């Protein structure tokens, strides 16, 4: 028994066209068809609802953090914060 994995498009009438390798020409074969629908790369995936999206709530802070991290951190370090700022 050999396994051959193919991808096919089902026509509007429910038919598919199957082309077998030339090595099987003029032979009787038995086929077992197992199918699984695949997502089209053209259709975007549906967004997750907010309560299931792992990125929502992951980060909260200033949108400028990436570009102004040192300034923001320096402003938030106070004598009572438990952190110190080492001048370079």
Image: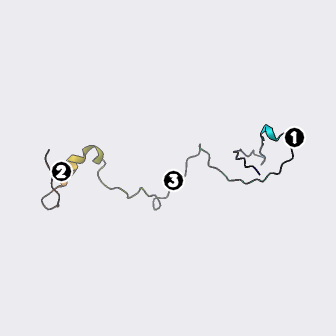
Mark 1 or mark 3, which has the lower sequence index? 1
| Distance in Å between CA atoms under marks 1 and 2 | 79 Å
Q: Earlier in the sequence, mark 3 or mark 2?
A: 3
Please give the residue where the numbered disc 3 appears in the rendered image.
Answer: 47
Q: What percent of the width, then of the height, locates residue 19?
A: 78, 40
The image shows residue 53 at horizontal and vertical percentages of 46, 58
Marks 2 and 3: in contact by CB < 8 Å? no
Q: Nearer the viewer, mark 3 or mark 2?
A: 2
Q: How many marks?
A: 3
Q: Residues within 10 Å of mark 3 (few under 14, many from 20)?
A: few
- Residue occupying the point 55% across, 47% down: 44
Up-down relation of residue 7 to residue 36 (above or below): above
Q: CA distance from mark 3 to mark 2?
A: 38 Å
Above or below, 45 against 50 in this view is above
In the displayed structure, does residue 10 sit left or right of residue 30? left
Q: Return the residue at label 2.
A: 74
Per the image, the residue denoted by label 1 is: 26
- The picture places residue 58, in percent across and down from the top left corner, at 37, 57
**Residue farthest toward the front in the current orientation of the protein:** 1
């Amino acid at each position: 028994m050999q396994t051959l994995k193919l991808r096919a498009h089902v026509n509007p009438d429910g038919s598919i066209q199957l082309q077998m390798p030339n090595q099987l020409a003029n032979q009787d074969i038995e086929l077992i068809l197992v199918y699984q629908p695949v997502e089209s790369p053209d259709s975007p995936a549906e967004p997750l609802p907010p309560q299931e999206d792992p990125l929502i709530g992951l980060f909260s802070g200033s949108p400028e953090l990436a570009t102004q991290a040192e300034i923001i951190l320096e402003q938030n370090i106070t004598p009572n914060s438990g952190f110190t700022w080492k001048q370079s």
